[in-house]
Image (spheres, rainbow, N blue to C red):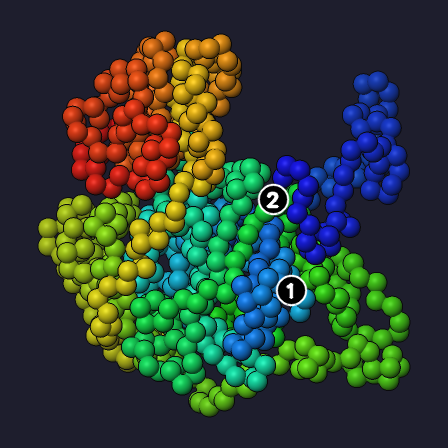
Amino acid sequence: MKGKKPENAKTDDLHMNTEDSSGEVMSNNQGLRVNDDQNSLTAGDRGPTLLEDFHFREKMTHFDHERIPERVVHARGEAAHGFFESYGDFSSITKAGFLGEKGKKTPVFTRFSTVAGFKGSSDLARDVRGFAVKFYTEEGNYDLVGNNMPVFFIQDAMKFPDLIHAVKPEQDNEIPQAASAHDTFWDFISLIPESMHMIMWVMSDRALPRSLSMMEGFGVHTYRFINKEGKSVFVKFHWKPKLGTHSVIWEEAQKISGQDPDFHRRDLWESIENGNFPEWELGVQLVEEKDEHKFDFDLLDPTKLIPEELVPVKILGKMVLNRNPDNFFAETEQVAFHPGHVVPGIDFTNDPLLQGRLFSYTDTQLTRLGGPNFAEIPINRPITPVHNNQRGGSMRQTINKGKGGYNPNKASGGCPFQASMADGGYVSHHEKIEGHKIRNRSKSFMDHFSQATLFYNSQTKVEQKHIIQALQFELGKVKSEAIRNRMVGMLTYVDQTLAEEVAKGLGIREIQKPEAPLNHSYPADSDPSDYQPTESKTKLKKSEKLSLLASPGKGIQGRIIAILADDGVDETSIKAFQRAIKDAGADSKIISTHSGSITASEGGSFTVDHSLMTTASVLFDAVLVIDGSKSTKSLKNDSLAIRFIDEAYRHYKFIGINGTGENLWDLTYASKNKLPKGVLFNKDPKSFIESISSHRVWEREDADQIPV
Ligand code: HDD
């Protein structure tokens, strides 16, 4: 970050482990000053390297062991520091201290991720995004480990390894990378109808965020809040982005993956560097215990959401991300999240997916971070003191004094003491549990299609079209005809027209309803009919907030506008647009026929951000051609400039054409339309910005006809 870094308790805590070489002499890991870091110690001028060369051996050994296993899922991610601020005292609903006082600030570290791709894959894969927040509270670390979609593919953690094996690259040739568009994924999905609701989300534009700061986050499971009186209330967590919810379309996503696979990572990094700090509000849906069974779905079922029409979202505070990590490996790679990291006031429900997660995360850290002491890694350690009787293990950092290490003891005066509830000791909610020891799926989980249909019906026409196209693409990549047919058959249970439209794209003339049983997730000695989907129950026909377009946010903050210009561009005009765009919290980039700089009409020099050859319209939110006859003449001679505009038109983006820029516009395919929607001729900066703040021109009917 430019200027002074915003300090918070975690930043201060990390300080003791940060290293800064400026002005320092090089030493080895033993602190010995290094005289020659360039040449090995050899026997003679041209002789072999000596085993004695401890400097070479130390340097090379460290390098040889630099990598650790990537996360088994969510391998690709990026993170930032920041803070959470409570809007009030919410102690009547939860005793969690970080929500107990108006204006109270808690440091956070937030990591976003894709799920299926490897560490080096593209940001713009069609995928769920991880949204994991570590709150460094005064009562210990609290991790809210969520996703950007409020539901999940499966109802029981037992199926997680199967789901991930199905979606990851196929096991014989490890193809395809970061994509669900292949046979094993759809084979699995077509056999488990419980996934249908999540499939609607993943096939929607939610899976292609424009920016990480333009997507929602969700805790997914129903958790519990516990207040000081020990009263429990069910809670669903929501993160609502200040910039609204926005996505790119699939064709752009594919091109961005080639043009800039780090698109989201770069955007997050740069917005923080530029002082445009991403911000979300934390909201909760609360359900009293007495109302647990009043819904037509089960609150413990992670494939269901609570429509906001039934339970509104109450906003509790905001999260601001304002500092980039100093070191990707030390912080972003080594951070270890776990839904079981909770503080007093937050507790679990018996959602079988959540219950399984409570085992999996610590288990995976043992391999990934190399042993049981990962909580001591600077990014993971709490800002509260740690005292217990855990000892030893690989890479132990803490030097525990005294002769103890057990409890109870008298020798150490009983220390460390257990904490009473009044002193912040964590006590699990006293939930009454009764039942037989069984492997089963509750009948209350068997309504697999209602909310899939609700989601589809709640989308605008454009969004529905994108879901259809996504399914046509994904299933179009599936080689097995049987899987394609089975999947389209399954879709008829969500929506008949959806299934028919997808079938058209796949060339399926006659849709075959899948043969019974529809659900293949049942135990060997059971009656399959006990596990089949039940009739749709949800009476709600639409839930407005399920459409991305329902939360557009305001203004153009975080957007990037491409300014096409060359030597001779009108200086007053380019300056006025640059200033207005910056003042609106957005960024502009000058794109020209060459790199370097351009000289404007009054002799001013402007740095070119990208030559046309090194960029593409898919990386920008809108395009602007500035007046200037010499400038337009050069741009006219570069077919990439013409393609740039046509492509932006095809992707429903606003295009600003000023003065002589019209000569360039006239060369585009798009200009065949004499009344083009969203093409803004000769607007001043203020009205240009006002117009483009609706971001996309979805009503542009001829967009698809542009052949680029
Ligand atoms: Fe998970 C990582 C979110 C189901 C097992 N998960 C991981 C991360 C996020 C989520 C955001 C990345 C954390 C980071 O940035 O380091 N996972 C979810 C959500 C789920 C979910 C919202 C469903 C509601 N996950 C889930 C299940 C299991 C796991 C059912 C296993 C039983 N998840 C893991 C894991 C990972 C993980 C294997 C990989 C790396 C890690 O934990 O630290 O343990």
Instruction: Name the residue located 77 percent from the left edge and 70 percent from the top edge.
Output: 387
User: Image quadrant for the C terminus?
Assistant: top left
Locate residue 433, reporting x and y percent: 48, 88
Locate residue 183, reporting x and y percent: 32, 51
Amino acid type shown at disc 1: Thr
Could you tell me if residue 142 is visible in this image? no
Q: In this view, does 19 lie to the left or right of 615?
A: right
Instruction: Name the residue located 45 percent from the left edge and 13 percent from the top edge.
Output: 600
Instruction: Name the residue located 34 percent from the left edge and 37 percent from the top edge.
Output: 690
- Indicate if the residue with disc 1 has its beta carbon within 8 Å of ligand 1: no
Could you tell me if residue 198 is visible in this image? yes
- Indicate if the residue with disc 2 has its beta carbon within 8 Å of ligand 1: no
Q: Is residue 663 above or below residue 193?
A: above
Q: Element type at marker 1?
A: strand
Residue 607's disc is none
* Depth check, front residue: 520 or 138: 138
Instruction: Name the residue located 79 percent from the left edge and 76 percent from the top edge.
Output: 416
- From the image, tell me which residue sits under label 2: 324
Q: In this view, does 557 lie above or below 379?
A: above
Locate residue 501, reporting x and y percent: 16, 50
* Depth check, front residue: 219 or 259: 219
Amino acid type shown at disc 2: Asn
Picture quarter containing residue 364?
bottom right
- From the image, tell me which residue sits under label 1: 137
Locate residue 476, reporting x and y percent: 25, 45
The residues bearing labels 1 and 2 have C-alpha atoms spaced at a distance of 20 Å
User: Image quadrant for the N terminus?
Assistant: top right
